[in-house]
Amino acid sequence: MDKRTTTLLHLNLIPELGPVSIERLLLYAHRQLAPDLPSTAGWHELLAVGDLLPLEYIFELDAAAIARITRLNEANAAAVAQQLKSMSALVEETALIQKHAVTILTPFDPAYPVCLREIHHPPPVLYCQGAALTSADQRLAIVGARKAGAYAQQVINHIIPPVVGQGWQVVSGGAVGADTMAHEAALAAGGVTIAVLGSGLLEPYPAANISLFARIAGSGGTVVSSFPLRMPPDRTTFPMRNRIIAGLSAGTMVVQAAERSGALITARYALEQGRTVFAVPGLVTDALSAGCHALIKQGAKLVAQANDILEEFGQVSAEAPIATQAWVQPDPLLATLREPVTLDELQLASGLAIDELQDRLFQLQVEGRVRQHVTGTWQLHDNCF
């Protein structure tokens, strides 16, 4: 590792420093040679300096200067000053990096993804296992609820193959539920998927997905983290992970998300970063549809088929749309829906489990074949008689 990588790794190992504080320290070093550097300077100016950045100035700072530059409180600044003078954590981390074949990327590296480098305060360090990340791959984030059900699985299985077929990589957070569905569907379609963890690579979370992460890394994909290798997850790490998921991707699709969920945090980051947000609608009676419906109200693009995503980026898949496929398939529910019926009556007549019935009704509603009255009853849409 070169001096810049080693310095950023050292800074990233200090718990009191985040991406903003690290960037401020780097800009301080830059100003020692360029005192007229504007107050709005950021990574663009740091990258222009390249290997001429005088990083040694950072290690000469005392606690008072660190507090002034980073705006940390006195106690945290003192902790930073002490850790800057110690090399033990860096030596231990470097040994682990070599032992576990981990690749380190910083914004100074050409392979660091361009779209991630362009966000405000990009992560100063990416730890990667598996295939090397490249700077300009087409990436789509797919996120959703940890309790995502059969409907999310159906949507993901329908949308991912044609998206992967157009050369897109699938990015998600490695969590149970929709994240796992997205990674598995990408692998099944022969595509590349990237899992961004909310913990260090040597403390993978959730433990239930350790084998999935190994398959991702061994199948041309990458497992990524911005956290030190031995860092466990906590309530602060997941929003940081979500920011990276959005930053790595040209667009983010949300499927099954409650009104307050991590998936919506990812969508918000995507909007802040100027990326396209897609949302899959669901049953109005399903709490896991509320988040997606809120996103659609706010301007997210409604997704019912892969081309709803691909067209946004000037591509088209030969995959037939959901509606075209569904119209040619007979559905026994339709005969029951010639007159308004309640959900309970439909369940009794169809023999379907309630979750399966709701998923089927939603699909028919998206296709324009059925409608729900304000009374809550269901009936064939007028143009289907």
Image (cartoon, grey):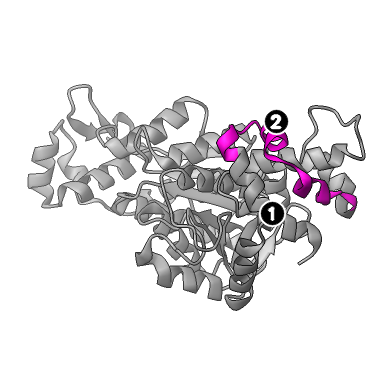
**In this view of the protein, can residue 334 be seen by the observer?**
yes
Which callout, 1 or 2, points to the residue nearer the camera? Answer: 1
Between 263 and 277, the one nearer to me in the picture: 263
Give the image location of residue 256, x and y in percent: 36, 43
Amino acid type at circle 2 is Arg
- Is residue 56 a member of the stretch shown in magenta? yes
Between 175 and 81, the one nearer to me in the picture: 81
Residue range corresponding to the magenta coloring: 52-76
Between 106 and 111, the one nearer to me in the picture: 106
Give the image location of residue 48, x and y in percent: 88, 45
Q: Is residue 166 left or right of residue 362?
A: right
Dot 2 falls on a residue whose secondary structure is helix
Residue at position x 26%, y 37% in the image: 286
Report, in whole angstroms, how far the alpha carbon at label 1 lies from the one at label 2: 18 Å
Q: Which residue is mark 2?
A: 68
**In this view of the protein, can residue 135 be seen by the observer?**
no
Give the image location of residue 381, x and y in percent: 29, 32
Q: Which residue is mark 1?
A: 85
Residue at position x 58%, y 62% in the image: 165
Residue at position x 73%, y 37% in the image: 24
The majority secondary structure of the magenta stretch comes to helix
Q: Residue furthest top?
A: 374
- Is residue 245 a member of the stretch shown in magenta? no
281 is higher (above) or lower (below) than 174? above
Give the image location of residue 244, x and y in percent: 58, 47
The quadrant in which residue 274 appears is top right
